[in-house]
Amino acid sequence: MKSRKRFITDKIYQSLITLISLIGLVILIAVFVFVFNKGSSLLSWDLLTGDYYSTVYDGYYDSELTTNLFVAPDDLDSDTYFSTRWGIALKDDLDREGHDYILIVYVDTESPLANLPDKNNEGEMVYMASGQSLDKIIFSDNTIMLSSKGAEAAISQFESATGIKDIMFTTAGKGIRGSLITTMYLIILTLIVALPIGILTAIYLHEFAPKNNKLVNILRRMVEMLTGVPSIIFGLLGAAVFIPIVSTVTGTEGGNLISGSLTLAVIILPVIISSTEETLKTIPDEYRQASLALGATKSQTTFKVILKSSAPGILSAVLLSIGRIIGESAALIYAIGTSIKDEIIVTERSTSLAVHIWSVMSGETPNFELASAISIIILLVVFVMNLSVKMIVKKISY
């Protein structure tokens, strides 16, 4: 009877553990599905390489329109509309924020729209090309075409128009090239600062520091404590300490990539120190004894034998650090700022991919589509780096 009761109790525990595990798995899958469902439609090469800020062009056409008719290219999609009189093809599309707009698909090289007089700068020209968006047109008969009317309506008005008083079109904008470059800079600069300090500290604590020393034990406890400190506190450290120091040295004002990298270096130091020290503990003492017996010094043994054997574990710590750098946002809001930039300079403000997500979600209308697209890119970057490090570790291990 007692045995049967224990069996039933064990089955209940197993069922509860399985159920809780499935709930966690379902939640994780739901998050991934939501992100990919919202953001996958915006993923494109142009999103990665495009500028965030669009350029607005304003032109006009008051010359006599030629009677020659243009021929549509054969490769136009079925949902694209073409004007035979003006030699332009348009289609309805979604911009990088998920809003409807008219996309300029094709402009014939002989089209009067290919180069137009600049309405704001006399003597200058503006050039219309594929990939731009058509925003507004005032035709010579004073009829107005807005992008909200759609591509088909715009082409219909083009076909009956003889001149254009005002035509406004813009480059795409809302790209994340600047934030992507900023993130890469932050990874490189942060690791340059944090890796040597973190690895050398771990080596001292495990290889050179006196055993069972109170001061060394206190230092270890402080490192462990820093691992659990909220990142917003590190952000305050960056704003109060690193920004003034960097501003004094570089002669700049406010947060920048350098102050952000120094802040991130402090954040990931506990991770590097703890992971490296744990890796050093796994190296057998026989390695040290054999090296010393062959006449090597303590330093030679540490850096040529022990550190080399610890390379796979250290690379894993680097991977964890890179993931923390890419995903960090709260600290960077204070230490580097939230200004989205297209031209990246290390002594100026900018935004990482994570802060870019915060920026597009903090407005009056949160942009879930663009935020999800950036999230997918972050996941892909972390996945590629994870795979690369594992391949390197595997190669080193053998």
Image (spheres, rainbow, N blue to C red):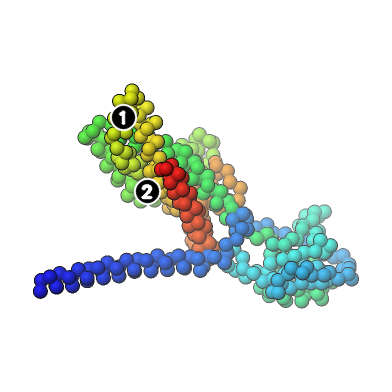
- Residue at the (47%, 38%) spot, across then down: 192
Left or right: residue 34 compared with residue 3: right
Name the residue nearer the viewer: 196 or 98: 196
Q: Position of residue 273 (x, y in %)?
A: 35, 41
Residue 105 image-quadrant placement: bottom right
Left or right: residue 57 compared with residue 175: right
Q: Is residue 111 above or below residue 280?
A: below
- Residue at the (10%, 71%) spot, across then down: 2
Residue 251 image-quadrant placement: top right
Q: Position of residue 115 (x, y in %)?
A: 80, 59
Residue 25 image-quadrant placement: bottom left
Name the residue nearer the viewer: 354 or 59: 354
Q: Residues within 10 Å of mark 2 (few under 14, many from 20)?
A: some
Q: Position of residue 384 (x, y in %)?
A: 49, 53
Q: Which of the two marks, 1 or 2, is nearer to us in this view?
A: 1
Name the residue nearer the viewer: 318 or 231: 318
Q: Is residue 317 above or below residue 161?
A: above
Dot 2: what SS? helix
Left or right: residue 23 compared with residue 376: left
Disc 1 designates what residue? Answer: 290
Observer able to see residue 386: yes
Tell me the tag on residue 233: 2
Observer able to see residue 363: no
Closer to the chain start, of discs 1 and 2, is 2
